Image (tube, coloured by chain):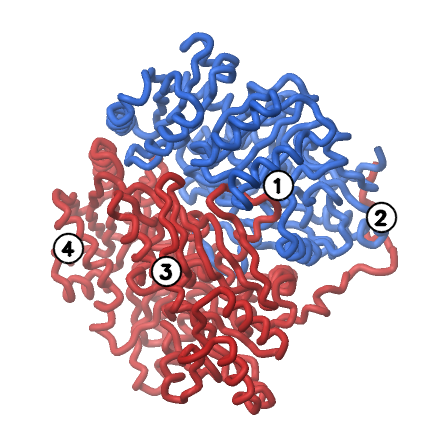
Chain colours: A blue, B red
Amino acid sequence: MGETWNPKDAAEVQAAVQDAVAQGRALELVGAGSRRGFGRPVTADVVLDLSALCGVVSYQPEELVVTLAPGVRLAELQALLATRRQQLAFEPPDLGPLWGLPAGRGTIGGMVMTGKGGPRRLTAGAPRDHCLGVKGVNGFGEAFAAGGRVVKNVTGFDLPKLVAGSFGTLCAVTELTLKVLPAPDDAATLVLLGLDDAAAIRAMSLALGSPAQAASAAHLPAEIAGASVLAGRIGAGVAATLLRLEGVTPSIAARRAHLAGMLEAAAPQILLDRDETQAVWKQVADVAVFAGDPDRPVWLISVPPAAGARVGARLAEELDGRCFYDWGGGGVWLEAPPAADAHAAHIRGVLAQAVGADGHATLIRAPGPVRSTMSPFQPLAPALAALTERVRAQFDPDRLFNPGRMGA
Amino acid sequence: MPLPDAGLIARRAEFVAALRAIVPGEGVISDEAALGAYECDGLTAYRQRPMIVVLPETVDQVSRVLAYCHAHGLKVVPRGAGTSLSGGALPLADGIILGMAKFKAILEVDFDNRCAVVQPGVTNLAVTQAVAHRGFYYAPDPSSQIACSIGGNVAENSGGVHCLKYGMTTNNLLGVELVLIDGTVVRLGGKHLDPAALDLLGVVCGSEGLLGVVTEVTVRILQAPQTQRALLLGFAQVEAAGACVAAVIAAGVIPAGMEMMDRLAIHAAEAFVQVGYPLDVEALLIIELDGAAAEVDHLIAVIETIAAENGAGSVRVSTSEAERQAFWAGRKAAFPAVGRIAADYYCMDGTIPRAALPRVLARMGEMADACGLRIANVFHAGDGNLHPLILYDATLPGELDAAEILGADILKLCVEVGGVLTGEHGVGVEKRDLMEVQFGPADLDQQQRLKCAFDDGGLLNPGKVFPKLCRCAELGRVHVHGGQVRFPELPRF
């Protein structure tokens, strides 16, 4: 590994980027480095470590906003928000253990840059939906700000949404303003037992199309449910379809009764209490059942929810892998045996057959050499790829930031 | 606006003929009288007759029209229903209006995937009407929803009274088909979640017609809540109403809507629709709860307690749908009601941190007094989006100018207290020259660079959003040269 630069504040970040621009040196932008396993490995001249930018600038619970530096640990922010019974509604996953790292290390910057929401993504959006403002330094060496510090704002182009999920390929972020929301008073999960994948997705569709307002919906086929915290509750060999209800206690009771009645004929049911709910959804969010063998590739395949089983069940069988479904069927998590291309060609072929261009398969975990030789992100149609590249070039014309990490 | 190019205007007949070859029949309007219908949008103070109006019916026509304009340096102003309150669809004397009104089809309603695929000319309300038979609706509800189009909603990232809980357009948008200025057609998103690459959908939404022309929209639909009830709370002081709003949020409640009106707006609305608003208060809050009946009942009790703790002088809770509608009737009629007590009014749209509300209201009152005008305030209190209505009389010399100056001063005040120029109406031409109040030169440069990636000739809606036109070649220059290290003292190891 080459040099590492450790700027302490936004001015030093700008100075560092200006030096990199002047010297034509490529930068790998990192916070805690906990998400390096995601995307193509970066070959850069210098590591720009932003973890020293780690202060909370302001937290205004009544305004529903927090402004902070990108190096703040997610765990630290969550603890701060919990003191005011608030949360990040998109339920950021902690995928560290999936990549073979300790839990709880990731930063806010990495969370926003990788753009992933957890199970509540289905109803509450992704980091992009909660990213209100950004300050950063672009590849021209200029410090710029975009967005604002209020929850409702349409002034100018919505660059914060573009920066969220850009894997550090547009700018070095020095400050973020995020929308925060009240944490629910209570939570429960209705579990439907023993459904096959296709029936489970139909049941989730029914539930999500009802007034019950489930916050998230996931299906764990028997093999996955048996490896989860639910095993003790439901026994081995039983699939579990999870419908999570959140809110005030009387509301949960009413909506649970509604759902239970509606799905009575579909499957036997059990109810998980608040603690059990928290435990099982944490496992779903963190893809915990796939942690443990870093050589086995893990994919997240995003499809129209009703198409989930056609993609997931088929691929799990053809590849001798395992899968489960989040986002009502629209987020298929697939783990498969090691392969030179992590099965990219096979998976994207099946995806194209099932949904055409209406979806994408993203490699979330694989050994570095595998990720170096294939595209972890779904290749784009040529016109969109060209537009995307033009956009990137308007932030970072010399491709100094995380070169190669994102894109085909 | 940019000075019209006489050379282009002189070639009008040539352009008309070429465009007619792409869009036959009545789809190309060049008749002076007919062009007059397009000379303004919802911001009627600004008017300009366009050179030509083109009303394509197919994506292929849109693509060929744009490719033609691109090849011939012809400027294009996209237009939906023309309800913009910021002049987003204000025409150019040397450009065409590309009207999307004929794209009126609802292409697909997909209940299994909880989405609808519609053409951009479909009205906001028509989306809800197309899915209502199964109990669904489309959540963003700008007050112009009966007329405004989904394509316009995407361009403006429209909000509405329920966006605190349900989000703006951008949070309910799954995908678009977009035609670029050179005629290229790209698809962003679809029925699936999250992009495979950079989130271009996120910047196209709210880009005010500067990046491309949307020809198809996929939106998320939701199951309508089982119950909706509202509280009507009167306060003797604005500060107390503001404190009540903060306390509701702090208690962990995100109401479906939380609206505030000040004394002048309350009196104007009550005189107009007679719904029983209290007239002896300085501020009125309408707080709406929705969801399961048990949830709504529970939260109403919570809010009644908070209202009492914050000194609400009058508290009414709707006990019927008719009563809930009555609570809203005054708020929804606030703009026309103000129109009855003044010859003209000018609607502003800044967002502020809610904590700054008493200070901002007081300052606005002083500023209005100083120039002899009155302001009525309606306010999306939950998300801090302020709609001051400046009352004036355009027939009196100088009053329109005074109103515009006061409006600009109010928006500067919004920025000064930590807010922004516009919460939902867009920058358009109206707030264009104030952008430098909120953004520094580097901030605007970066936004304009994005524009250059989509439209480096600056042909799409020039003169909107940015106080200076893009100079893409200049912006592309790297500003650091010569290999010198600027900050050698920075530790690097």
- Asked if labels 3 and 1 touch by Cβ distance under 8 angstroms, the answer is no
Question: Label 4 is found on which chain of the structure?
Answer: B
Which of the two discs, 1 and 3, sits closer to the camera? 3
Which of the two discs, 1 and 2, sits closer to the camera? 1
> Which labelled disc corresponds to residue B86?
none
Disc 1 packing (10 Å; few <14; some 14–19; many ≥20) = many
Residue type indicated by callout 2: Pro
Circle 2 is placed at which residue position? B488
As drawn, the residue found furthest toward the right would be B483
- Asked if labels 2 and 4 touch by Cβ distance under 8 angstroms, the answer is no
A229 left or right of B442? Answer: left
Circle 3 is placed at which residue position? B105
Residue type indicated by callout 4: Pro
Residue type indicated by callout 1: Met
Residue shown at 26% from the left, 59% from the top: B262
Residue shown at 52% from the left, 85% from the top: B17
Q: Is residue B440 visible?
A: no
Q: Position of residue B175 (x, y in %)?
A: 48, 51
Circle 4 is placed at which residue position? B278
Which of the two discs, 4 and 1, sits closer to the camera? 1
Whole-number angstrom distance, CA of label 3 to CA of label 4: 45 Å
- Say which quarter of the image contains residue B393: bottom left
N-term mark: 2 or 3: 3
Q: Position of residue B273 (x, y in %)?
A: 14, 63
Q: Is residue B42 visible?
A: yes
Question: Label 1 is found on which chain of the structure?
Answer: A
Q: Position of residue B182 (x, y in %)?
A: 61, 68
Looking at the rendered structure, the secondary structure element under dot 3 is: loop
Nearer to the camera, A263 or B476: A263
Circle 1 is placed at which residue position? A113
B219 left or right of A303? Answer: left
